[in-house]
């Protein structure tokens, strides 16, 4: 009788596993089944003496279990993909570090995929990870309001989950509420409140890309806090931008091009992320506008470089590394069939030298 493709693949994989585990079993003087149970840490009773012999043999032979082959036998390999928007953005670098921290002792490989904030590219990564039979995908970045993200991505994610893989979101997304997140709106509103407390009532806002759900949440926090403080919102002072330092520098020029004067029409610039704030600091310095004497500047995220700028950057601290750690743990819980309870992590306003009272 002919052997099907799937059955043939499993036979090849088993043969590859046996060829190496056989040597361990022979040296330890045990059966192949016993040696396999010990090295794979299977939940099967093996005496302490036998286990020690097998582990000693495995060390002497420098035996490493073939995680890929074992994963293929289960139709899933121990890989978790982390989809970020930009690998050069310290925000995402910190999250990925957290994922790797949690994955270090778990036997899972972490693969980082950069979508460059393009929905089609994000969808292609999900397809690729699905083809690899990855165990899980963590969306580190916000969802995007574009055609590919709304129509194509949900189809591939549903297929990925249908294969038994875990999917976790760390930011608002069209696919649903995030499993692990921070209060973006509340954190931004808290920074507005802090600036108002310093006497600022004319606060410009560099809002980030309007196509990102997280940017919309932060803009909502800005509007909410000003309204609560009884401050009329001047739409001239809200600038749609990218999320890079270069975008921050361009946004300063856009803001000044409206005729708004620093120190008069606006006394503070609040940025929707720290990279925007870094670009703002640089451009203001180039223009001879002093921070914080002429205008205060604040960011959002508290990336590591924020405290090393001159002046040091006031910002909203997010527990980025912890988000990554909890994201990986959530993926493992989902793989174990556990119900995920969404967690919203706290934010903290950190005032440094880039802001002052007026």
Image (spheres, grey):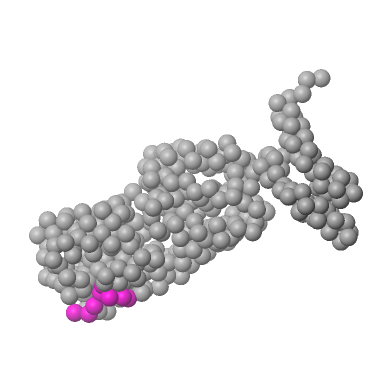
Compared to residue 129, the image places residue 317 above or below, namely below
Q: Is residue 186 visible?
A: no
Whether residue 16 appears in this view of the structure is: yes
Instruction: Residue lying at the far front in this picture: please name it.
Output: 60
**Percent position of residue 222, x then y:** 30, 65
Q: Quadrant of the C terminus?
A: bottom left
Total number of numbered discs in the rendering: 0
Q: Is residue 290 covered in magenta?
A: no
* Residue at left offset 22%, top offset 57%: 249
Residue located farthest toward the top when viewing the structure as drawn: 1
Residue closest to the eye, 120 or 281: 281
Foreground of the two, 201 or 29: 29
**Residue 352 counted in the magenta span:** yes
Between residues 172 and 11, which one lies in front from this camera angle?
11
Q: Main secondary structure of the magenta part?
A: loop
Q: Residue at x 86, y 51 (%)?
A: 28
Kindly indicate the quadrant of the structure image that contains residue 254.
bottom left
Q: Position of residue 338 (x, y in %)?
A: 65, 57
Whole-percent x, y for residue 71 in the image = 68, 43
Q: Residue at x 47, y 38 (%)?
A: 124
Indicate the quadrant containing the N terminus: top left, top right, bottom left or bottom right: top right
User: Is 185 placed left or right of 104 in the picture?
Assistant: left
In magenta, the rendered stretch is: 351-358
Going 16% across and 61% down the picture, which residue do you hit?
286
Residue 235 place in picture, x, y as percent: 19, 59
């Amino acid at each position: 009788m002919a052997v099907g493709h799937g059955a043939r693949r499993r036979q090849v994989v088993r043969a590859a596993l046996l060829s190496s585990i056989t040597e361990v079993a022979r040296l330890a003087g045990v059966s192949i089944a016993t040696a396999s149970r010990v090295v794979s840490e299977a939940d099967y009773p093996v005496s302490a003496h036998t286990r020690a012999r097998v582990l000693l043999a495995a060390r002497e032979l420098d035996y490493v279990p073939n995680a890929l082959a074992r994963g293929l036998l289960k139709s899933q390999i121990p890989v978790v993909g982390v989809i970020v928007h930009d690998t050069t953005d310290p925000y995402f670098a910190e999250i990925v570090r957290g994922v790797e921290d949690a994955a270090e002792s778990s036997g899972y490989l972490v693969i980082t995929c950069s979508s460059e904030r393009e929905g089609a590219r994000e969808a292609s990564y999900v397809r690729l990870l699905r083809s690899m039979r990855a165990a899980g995908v963590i969306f580190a970045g916000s969802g995007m309001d574009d055609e590919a993200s709304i129509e194509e991505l949900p189809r591939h994610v549903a297929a990925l989950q249908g294969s038994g893989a875990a999917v976790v979101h760390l930011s608002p997304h069209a696919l649903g509420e995030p499993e692990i997140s921070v209060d973006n709106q509340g954190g931004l509103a808290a920074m507005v409140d802090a600036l108002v407390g310093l006497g600022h009532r004319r606060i410009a806002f560099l809002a980030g890309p309007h196509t990102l759900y997280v940017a919309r949440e932060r803009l909502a926090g800005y509007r909410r806090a000003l309204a609560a403080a009884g401050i009329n919102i001047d739409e001239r002072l809200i600038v749609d931008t990218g999320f890079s330092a270069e975008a921050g520098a361009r946004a300063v020029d856009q803001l000044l091009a409206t005729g708004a004067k620093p120190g008069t029409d606006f006394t503070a610039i609040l940025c929707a992320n720290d990279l925007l704030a870094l670009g703002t600091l640089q451009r203001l310095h180039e223009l001879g506008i002093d921070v914080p004497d002429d205008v205060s500047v604040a960011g959002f995220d508290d990336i590591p470089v924020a405290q090393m700028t001159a002046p040091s950057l006031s910002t909203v601290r997010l527990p980025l590394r912890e988000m990554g750690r909890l994201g990986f743990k959530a993926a493992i819980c989902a793989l174990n069939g556990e119900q995920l309870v969404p967690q919203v992590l706290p934010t903290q306003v950190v005032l440094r030298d880039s802001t002052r009272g007026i």
